[in-house]
């Protein structure tokens, strides 16, 4: 299992799914003597857990095997037992690779699952006093004390595991969760009639025909038909089947009351209470009330809880996976920033933004909001489960009124009928493939400008770009133009992608470059002759001259100052200094045509489009390789042009070295050697990027005849 920065409910739903073999956690039922349906998994779950019951912590094998049955069991990377003296403890190392850039919020979202794991350990191993989880590779720790957890239970935790009946009672309580939204409610809120209370039960332990009983000491319990808008006041108690959420409202509550208790009971098919939890709600001021988070009581907000109804099966994963996916998108994008102070928006902030959106979006979409201290931020929205979705072929149109410089996003269907329009000037992007809206909030800042750029790749599914940017960040570079200061850019083709990479340079290095270049005498050059080719490296000096590295057809190295139309600076020493600096910082490399020799194997890897499958053909026939080598060695340096270079040709030499070429897959006979050097392998090349009067791509098609070249 790979950790996906899951929110709390994902782990909770997964908790029993991983306790024992997946096959026993199905919800198929069997009839007992009374004819009522009961989950078949319960008996097996109890047996599989209780077999690890022991009084002492010292049996490392037993502890390890038990942990292997719990959530994150596959991620367990060793345990440590503290058995010399009290307090006796267990330290569990979980390696969760995708959590490398995680924040404390991410770790906090794991805590309910880790807490459940700790409770299982406390209940089955009598002398365990502490359970500590160490999350690798970030080395973040979460620790639970037996004394801390014991306060939530009427009996000793160890006592629950003395027999199956008692342990079933214990598990029913552990895997009964209540989610409350919003955590803080004010009677001035218009988006909800009160605090929404929904229940999550695990299908391996609970019958789908269970019902719930809700009661409150003060205030009222409501139900809300969201289709008609009708709100029904049920007073202080109601009892009905699982499914529809209940709302608690303070209306009618006496002003002197400072605390309220809402009790949620789960009833079996005989109307007997089998599990019960109490929600404590405190009055904060005249109009505001806050639900207190406690064991099994999870308070939520727009970013971490969007369950709309009770669940008694694994649907809780699907119900919230969309919002969890938005959280993962946000984390992946913000990970690429140099630094940020983003935090989640409050319910009030999200409500204010949603009110400005078209009705179809406001009523059917939800999501998360991230905001900086300066008020700049962004919102990600996706469609609610079961809500009205936009058509698959929705068209996005940007419209600017004649009397305004601002733009307005308009959504249309395939027949160009208007679906809705967003407020004028609101920066909105809709990524149809993932059904995600990206909305910029507040004045643009350095970070939100960067996030908007990253979002265009992250939310459209171009994860290769995101991964490359992640690698670039580790190198101290970026795929995005620095917004201030001097920098050097390198034009790079790698793994079929064109990825300009930017290196910020300090002013002392920028001044050194400027000083050395200014001392070089100018050499006249007729640019119209085509004898000078760019090498894909540009030096941009803040408030000063800009340059690019070039090479003549005869091999001389030059630097071209952009402001000089008919002159270059010929100096191989300065040229190589800059090129070497770029090669140390990035994958950029300049490979000479002379490197193609003594080929013993040629491997063509063809992808006509970015998302298409890869076809591979290997050629090792000596005569064919000699023909291929002769064809490529006569290529002329022309520049990269705008071709789709989606085929990779790997040439293995006799000395074991491998040369990589990007091959154009349109009708051009162009290729890129290394990461930057663009060549034409047809005869008598004309202008840059153009072949001669014979297209030699046909030769490659004949040599690699088992591959489809047709787009």
Image: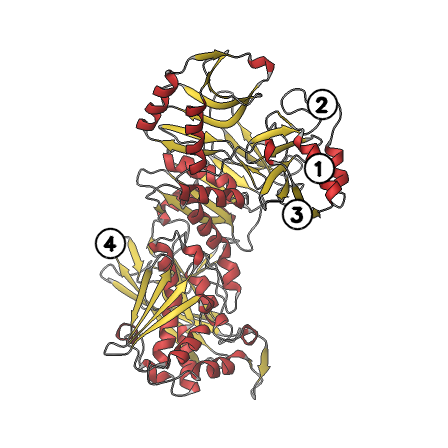
C-alpha separation, residue under disc 4 versus residue under disc 1: 81 Å
Can you give x and y, in whole percent of width and height, for residue 500 in the image? Answer: 50, 33
Q: How many marks?
A: 4
Q: Which mark is residue 628?
A: 1
Q: Using the numbered discs, state the Cα–Cα distance from disc 3 to disc 2 in whole angstroms.
A: 30 Å
Residue 277 appears at what percent x and percent y?
Answer: 36, 72
Element type where label 3 sits in the image: loop
Q: Dot 4: what SS?
A: loop
In space, the residues marked 3 and 1 are separated at their CA atoms by 22 Å
The quadrant in which residue 163 appears is bottom left
Cα gap from disc 3 to disc 4, whole angstroms: 63 Å
Visible in this render: residue 632? Answer: yes
Callout 3–callout 4 Cβ contact below 8 Å: no
Residue at left offset 48%, top offset 52%: 325
For the point 39% across and 77% down, which residue is it? Answer: 63
Residue 614 is labelled as 3
Which label sits on residue 285? 4
Tag 4–tag 1 contact (CB < 8 Å): no
Q: Residue at x 68, y 36 (%)?
A: 629
Q: Position of residue 354 (x, y in %)?
A: 44, 43
Q: Quadrant of residue 494?
A: top right
Q: Compare marks 3 and 1 and give the one earlier in the sequence.
A: 3
Image quarter (top left, top right, bottom left or bottom right) of the C terminus = top right
Residue 692 disc label: 2
Q: Choose mark 3 or mark 1, whichever is in front.
A: 1
Who comes first in sequence, dot 2 or dot 1? 1
Circle nearer the viewer, 4 or 2: 2
- Considering the numbered disc 1 on the image, is that residue within a helix, a strand or a loop? helix
Upstream in the sequence, badge 4 or badge 2?
4
């Amino acid at each position: 299992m790979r950790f996906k920065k899951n929110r709390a409910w994902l782990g909770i739903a997964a908790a029993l799914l991983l306790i024992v073999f997946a096959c026993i956690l199905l919800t198929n039922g069997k009839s007992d003597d009374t004819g009522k349906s009961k989950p078949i998994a319960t008996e097996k779950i109890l047996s599989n857990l209780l077999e690890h019951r022991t009084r002492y912590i010292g049996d490392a094998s037993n502890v390890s095997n038990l942990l292997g049955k719990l959530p994150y069991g596959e991620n367990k990377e060793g345990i440590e037992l503290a058995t010399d003296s009290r307090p006796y403890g267990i330290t569990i190392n979980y390696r969760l690779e995708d959590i490398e850039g995680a924040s404390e919020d991410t770790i906090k979202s794991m805590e309910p699952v880790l807490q459940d794991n700790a409770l299982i350990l406390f209940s089955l191993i009598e002398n365990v006093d502490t359970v500590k989880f160490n999350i690798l590779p970030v080395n973040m720790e979460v620790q639970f004390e037996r004394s801390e957890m014991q306060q939530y239970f009427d009996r000793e935790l160890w006592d629950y595991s003395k027999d199956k009946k008692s342990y079933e009672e214990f598990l029913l309580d552990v895997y009964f969760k209540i989610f409350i939204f919003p955590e803080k409610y004010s009677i001035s809120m218009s988006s909800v009639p009160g605090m929404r209370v929904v229940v999550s039960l695990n299908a391996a332990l609970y019958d789908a025909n269970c019902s719930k009983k809700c009661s409150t000491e003060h205030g009222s319990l409501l139900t809300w038909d969201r289709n008609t808008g009708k709100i029904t006041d049920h007073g202080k108690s109601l009892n009905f089947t699982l499914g529809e959420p209940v709302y608690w409202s303070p209306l009618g509550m006496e002003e002197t009351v400072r605390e309220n208790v809402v009790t949620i009971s789960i009833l079996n098919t005989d109307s007997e209470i089998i599990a019960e939890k109490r929600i404590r709600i405190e009055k904060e001021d005249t109009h505001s009330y806050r639900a207190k988070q406690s064991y099994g009581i999870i308070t939520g907000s727009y970013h971490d809880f969007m369950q709309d109804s009770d669940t008694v099966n694994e649907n809780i994963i699907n119900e919230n996976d969309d919002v969890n996916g938005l959280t993962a998108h946000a984390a992946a994008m913000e990970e690429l920033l140099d630094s940020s102070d983003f935090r989640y928006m409050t319910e009030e902030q999200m409500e204010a933004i949603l009110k400005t959106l078209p009705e179809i979006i406001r009523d059917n979409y939800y999501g998360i909001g991230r905001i900086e201290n300066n008020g700049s931020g962004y919102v990600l929205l996706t469609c609610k489960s079961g809500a009205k979705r936009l058509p698959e072929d929705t068209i996005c149109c940007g419209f600017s009124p004649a009397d305004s410089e601002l733009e307005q996003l308009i959504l249309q269907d395939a027949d160009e009928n208007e679906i809705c329009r967003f407020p004028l000037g609101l920066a909105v992007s809709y990524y149809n493939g993932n059904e995600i809206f990206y909305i910029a909030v507040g004045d643009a800042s350095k970070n939100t400008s960067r996030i908007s750029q990253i979002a265009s790749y992250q939310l459209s599914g171009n994860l290769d770009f995101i991964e490359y940017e992640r690698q670039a960040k580790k190198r101290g570079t970026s795929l995005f133009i620095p917004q201030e200061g001097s920098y050097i850019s390198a034009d790079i083709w790698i793994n079929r992608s064109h990825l300009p990479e930017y290196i910020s340079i300090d002013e002392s290095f920028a001044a050194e470059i400027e000083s050395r270049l200014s001392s070089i005498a100018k050499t006249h050059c007729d640019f119209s002759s085509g004898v000078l080719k760019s090498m894909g490296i540009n030096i941009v000096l803040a408030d000063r001259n800009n340059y690019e590295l070039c090479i003549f057809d005869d091999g001389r190295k030059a630097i071209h100052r952009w402001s000089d139309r008919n002159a270059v600076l010929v100096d191989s020493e300065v040229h190589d200094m800059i090129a070497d600096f770029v090669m140390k910082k990035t994958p950029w490399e300049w490979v000479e045509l002379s490197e193609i020799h003594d080929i013993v194997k040629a491997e063509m890897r063809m992808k006509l489009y970015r998302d298409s499958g890869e076809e591979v053909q290997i050629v090792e026939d000596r005569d064919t390789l000699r023909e291929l080598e002769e064809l490529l060695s006569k290529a002329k340096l022309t520049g990269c042009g705008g071709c789709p270079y989606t085929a990779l040709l790997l040439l293995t030499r006799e000395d074991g070295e491998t040369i990589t070429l990007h091959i154009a897959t349109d009708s051009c006979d162009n290729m890129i050697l290394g990461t930057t050097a663009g060549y034409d392998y047809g005869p008598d090349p004309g202008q840059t990027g153009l072949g001669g009067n014979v297209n030699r791509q046909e030769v490659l098609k004949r040599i690699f005849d088992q591959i489809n070249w047709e787009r």
